[in-house]
Image (spheres, grey):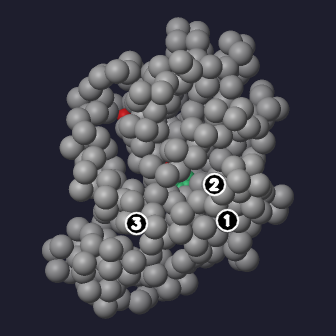
Amino acid sequence: MTRLLITGASGLLGGALLHRGLNTADILACTHDTRLHPQGFDTRNIDLAVEFHAKDLVAGFKPDWICHCAALTDVDLCQRQPKSAHRLNVAASGALARAAADYGAQFLLISTDSVFDGSRGRYVETDATGPLNEYAASKLEAERRVRGFLPEVLIARVNFYGWNLKPKRSLAEWVLAQLEAGVSVPGWTDVYFTPLFNMDLADCLNAMMARGLSGTYHVAGSERCSKYEFARAVAAEWGHDPEAIRPTEMATAGLGAPRPLDTSLRCDKLYRELGHVLPDLRTGLRRMRNFVESDLSAFRSLLG
Ligand SMILES: NC(=O)c1ccc[n+]([C@@H]2O[C@H](COP(=O)([O-])OP(=O)(O)OC[C@H]3O[C@@H](n4cnc5c(N)ncnc54)[C@H](OP(=O)(O)O)[C@@H]3O)[C@@H](O)[C@H]2O)c1
């Protein structure tokens, strides 16, 4: 079996990769503070921001693949603390990549659609980047840093939704919680993206690793939508009234860090490789609801 090191294994994506990879890979799941309950995989708590930890981790486990999901993902926190963002998102990614090069591991770096400035949307891999905030700048710098150690790195620029392992709310979970509390939900009509269900993303990333792909790929849902349309689709899928979503614009939210308006991604390069397209929004949300109804308790049992 492939030896797979997943960093950020308690996160929205790392948790999905762990859940989907359980019976097909020999997994070491790394988190910082969160305790996982090892059941058919090993787990380790480690602070990747401490540089020598990356080398120890890779030297000890000797993975075939490293799927590096750990990051400081709070955009406003990154804006206030750019050094912290750099330490984890750039320096730790570089240290892991250097260790991967030393020990012959292949490397999948999870990057973001936010590397683009959002002025145009429908981006392809060769389009010019232009990060608007510290988080996005640190993720783009991580791409460069890792490529410097590992020219053959596989980089996936993503955007996803789903159910969290931890008691933390993704956009879809937040929308549902608001609707269930009977509170009207603001939905941005001017912000566009191409979100993918996290379990579908995990399956796709596993397929990409199994094929031994390298280079930069956009890995996103096949439907571009606004956050408003996304929230309405979540409401409809769960049987709530979509009219409970209140159209508004991002500027009304008074956010700390500037954010791009349209980070929708085109995945033609990936589709040519896979031979099929990734799910559209409604298909993904239906799969998410099925997951919540049938798999959530098994998924949550991964938590220690
Ligand atoms: N969420 C999105 O829609 C989105 C969009 C585009 C790109 N991405 C990228 O996708 C990746 C995964 O994002 P996510 O939303 O799944 O992340 P997340 O839910 O915020 O989880 C972050 C993960 O990183 C770990 N971590 C934090 N600080 C650490 C440290 N110092 N040392 C080791 N591990 C540490 C956390 O462990 P603990 O639980 O122990 O703290 C957790 O497992 C990231 O690279 C992110 O930039 C996300």
Whether residues under marks 2 and 1 lie with C-beta atoms below 8 angstroms apart, the answer is yes
Q: Is residue 73 above or below residue 10?
A: below
Q: Nearer the viewer, mark 1 or mark 3?
A: 3
Q: CA distance from mark 1 to mark 3?
A: 19 Å
- Where residue 28 sits in the image (x, y, percent)? 45, 21
Instruction: Identify residue for label 1.
Output: 265
Q: Please, what is the three-letter code of the amino acid marked with disc 3?
A: Leu
User: Callout 2: few (<14), some (14-19), or many (20+) C-alpha neighbours within 10 Å?
Assistant: many
Q: Amino acid at mark 1?
A: Leu
The x, y position of residue 136, in whole percent, is 63, 55
Crowd class of label 3 (few under 14; some 14 to 19; many from 20; radius 10 Å): many
- Looking at the image, which residue is at 40% across and 66% down? 285
Earlier sequence position, callout 2 versus callout 1: 2
Image point (67%, 20%), residue name: 105
**Residue drawn at (53%, 39%), measured in percent from left and top?**
69
Q: Quadrant of residue 180?
A: bottom left
Residue tagged 3: 285
Residue type at the position of mark 2: Val
Asked whether mark 1 and ligand 1 are closer than 8 Å, the reply comes as no
